[in-house]
Amino acid sequence: MRIPCSLLWLSTALVATAPLADRLALGLDNGLVLRDNGSAVNLRPLADARGQFSLAAMADETAPPRQLRQVAIGLQARLALREDGTVWANGLSGLGATGNDAGSPSEWVQVRKLSEVVQIAAGYGHGLALKRDGTVWAWGWNVFGQIGDGSHNNAHQPLQVAGLSKVRQIGTRFNSSFALTESGELWAWGYNDHGSLGDGSTTMRLRPVKLELPALREIAIGEQHNFARTQSGEWLGWGYNLQCQVGVAPGGRCEDVLVPTRLGRSWKAIIPGSTYTLALNEDGSALWGWGRDQAGVLHGRGNAEGSITPVELDGSRWIGQTLKEVVIGRFAAAALTGTGRLYWWGQVNHIDNPAQPLPQLVQHAPAALDLKQADSCMAQAKMVGTDIRLSLPCVGFQGQDYQAELSLLPLSGQTVFRLDSLMPR
């Protein structure tokens, strides 16, 4: 029996009914994929000699620790939540984004003073953690008050956000922070220039303020625009809206929305980005989007200036598959299907790489297999047309003998192989 390589990495039995992206995280120029065994692999840009660009799953020295529950990526740091309730970070520590001044930018370090954490979120330069007791903790960059301690001072280790209790969901993507309580109350603090907090003003909030809203079920946090679903199932949106990314146009024009406003359409999940928003239909079979079609994130079907009208994205690559999880980076998006396939589109590190408006299957580099763990592997090379193929009978890899088939990719200045299949011997 041949095992498709795409099934080696991702669970085929994921259940993602909440908008939280626990298993996927996508940043400006990298990503993380959480595997079934609690380990994670890095998503890295990969360009071949013809200039074709893709993402590849790579296991390298910057992989986070094992036994993970959730991953998150911000601008300054990447976060990983372990099953034991500790939080780990890797990235730039100068502004406190790692919650630990020790270590190099490529080294994963444990965030100080945190235990019994059940959820994490990463902003541009700060992090949030929700503990089992319902308290919220924050650390990192604080120029906009996103730490919530009443100051503008950066926090190099986590501080408890005062005034919050019985919280069940946290969220941040930019410089605004949110906490949803068990009773459905929403609290917000930090950056508010475009009404990002939803409190009816554009005033920066250094401490959490409670929004006057009906009881909420969940929140979906973007860069400067956000969404919340009420207990009755209605979606509300607010914040930065100059490209119509909130999906409403009070007065017939796309202007900032300072107060949460009803969308008037039902969605299973909403995934807000920067100038655009994606949404899953109720059965998870189709992905829609609105706002500005930047870098091909709306598959070239949207308006380059922005539109409140949702357009259905090209789902031809995942026909017959249910989308279980969707995440958004700065200019790119990724979707995980129920069969364990991972697709991405848009621009990762948009300055250097061309846009990919149609979903691309994420490639898997063999380094992620960590074949060094096998007792022995004997490589046999052969030419197939212009391609170089390697056959590696491996004894004792992950408790079983396998036959790995790999192809050498034509990359300039690198030696990279693609895993084509893995077959038990």
Image (tube, rainbow, N blue to C red):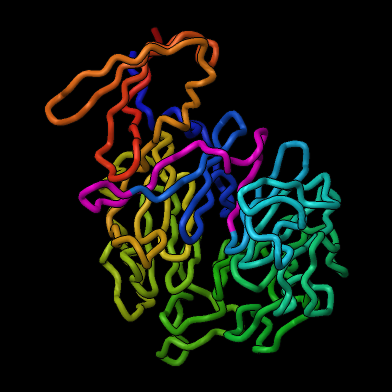
Magenta segment: 47-73
In this picture, is 150 found above or below 159? below
Q: Nearer the viewer, residue 361 or 171?
A: 361
In the picture, measured across the screen, residue 112 lies left or right of residue 228, that is right
| Quadrant location of the C terminus in the rendered image | top left
Q: How many marks?
A: 0
Residue 283's spot in the image, x, y percent? 43, 48
In the picture, measured across the screen, residue 33 lies left or right of residue 2, that is right
Q: Nearer the viewer, residue 215 or 111?
A: 111
Residue 5, image quadrant? top left
Residue 138, image quadrant? bottom right
Residue 51's spot in the image, x, y percent? 24, 53
Q: Residue at position x 83%, y 66% from top? A: 161
Q: Residue furthest bottom?
A: 251
The answer, for residue 420, to whether it is visible in the render is yes
The answer, for residue 212, to whether it is visible in the render is no
Residue 423, image quadrant? top left
Q: Residue at position x 63%, y 65% from top? A: 123
Residue 61 magenta-highlighted: yes
Q: Residue furthest left?
A: 385
